[in-house]
Amino acid sequence: MRTAPLMSFGLAMLLATPAMAQPALTADAINAADIGTLLYAALNVPAWTPASQRVATPDPAMVRLQILLDRAGVSPGVIDGYDGDNVRKAIFAFETMRGLAADGQLDDDVLGALESGDQVIGTYDVTDEDVADIVPPIPSDYAEMAQRDFLGYTGVREALGERFHMAESLLTAINPGSGFAVGDTIFVAAYGPDLEGEVVRIEADKTLRQVRAYDAEDRLIAAYPATIGSEDNPSPTGTHIVEAVAPMPNYTYNPSINFQQGENTSVLTIPPGPNGPVGSMWIDLSEPTYGIHGTPEPSKIDKTGSHGCIRLTNWDANELAAMVTPGVPVVFLD
């Protein structure tokens, strides 16, 4: 049976984090968190609360919810312990995957299908490889970037945060006192293995700001929060085709074709790396200069505009790329 396309939902469904006393943010608190404690706020708060009015610390129950959503194939973006649009969109996609009433609200049906009772925080031993490729701070100017050989991670926390889909602040918070040195055992999000499967169709929903991947039976198998163009640089319309998949790509900056960056008026070749302009992955589309790609700033997904392309977190772009081949259609939904 054909899966009905997801419908956009208004800000009234983007609901606030509960204003309640927060348990200590430890691995034990997150593993023991009851995401059902979020139910009252999710069902009764009528509108989204601005970030300035939210609780000042991450909620262990929200961390648990984000990790469980990530495991289920519906990315909440960066796992940080805070409620927001990306969490609500992930719930909405999960409901659609499981044939539940899709309203973006955390309710008993969602909890029953999502909660496994398993631990969501595990341990990891920092290795030599984790610290081997740390680079100096990345310049913002493209001409200076072009002088580098590789635009890698600038710190161990950044590298491990991306590896485990976590905000650096959350990684630091649950590992107080850790220097993240080789041999240190740290707590990390146990988000599960990357999804596997064959994607035959991709939807880029401009209104919902989400990328959705479907299999040969038209089942929704993955969903990712996305930045899709901006008012100044809108994304394409219609259907376009995946032409190639390029991990760790160079990026060719051409101001006459793309956009003006700083004072740079010449064509530049920006080296590869997770902190490059297109992150660690480029999925090339048949519309010239457009693609689905990663980002050096995962926390800004769906919070700032792009230059017309589809921007995902590096880990989401990498996961999606492993499931697509040239010829897959990408449908832009207005």
Image: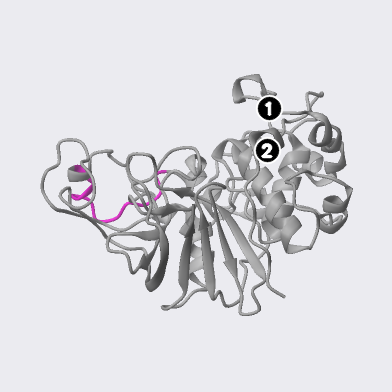
> 321 above or below 171?
below
Q: Residue visible at 58% across and 52% down?
A: 183
Q: Residue 275: where, in percent of width, then height?
A: 37, 49
Query: Considering only order in the chain, which callout, 2 or 1, is on the residue closer to the N terminus?
Result: 1
Q: Which of the 4 image quarters holds residue 306?
A: top left
Extreme-top residue of the structure: 53
Q: Residue visible at 63% across and 49% down?
A: 76
Q: Name the element at disc 1.
A: loop
Coloring scheme of the render? Answer: one colour
Q: Residue 186: where, in percent of width, then height?
A: 65, 47
Q: Front-most of 208 and 311?
A: 208
For the stretch drawn in magenta, the main secondary structure is loop
Give the number of marks.
2
Q: Name the element at disc 2.
A: loop
In this picture, residue 236 sits left or right of residue 164: left
Q: Front-most of 289 and 23?
A: 289
Residue at numbered disc 1: 57
Q: Which residues are magenta?
A: 144-154
Q: Let me know if residue 18 appears in the view.
A: yes
Residue at numbered disc 2: 81
Does residue 309 show up magenta in the picture?
Answer: no
Q: Front-most of 267 and 232?
A: 232
Q: Residue 53: where, in percent of width, then height?
A: 65, 19
Mark drawn on residue 4? none
Amino acid found under the numbered disc labelled 1: Thr
Disc 1: CA contacts within 10 A as few (<14), some (14-19) or many (>=20): some
The answer to the question of whether label 1 and label 2 lie on touching residues, with beta carbons closer than 8 A, is yes
Q: Residue visible at 19% across and 43% down?
A: 144
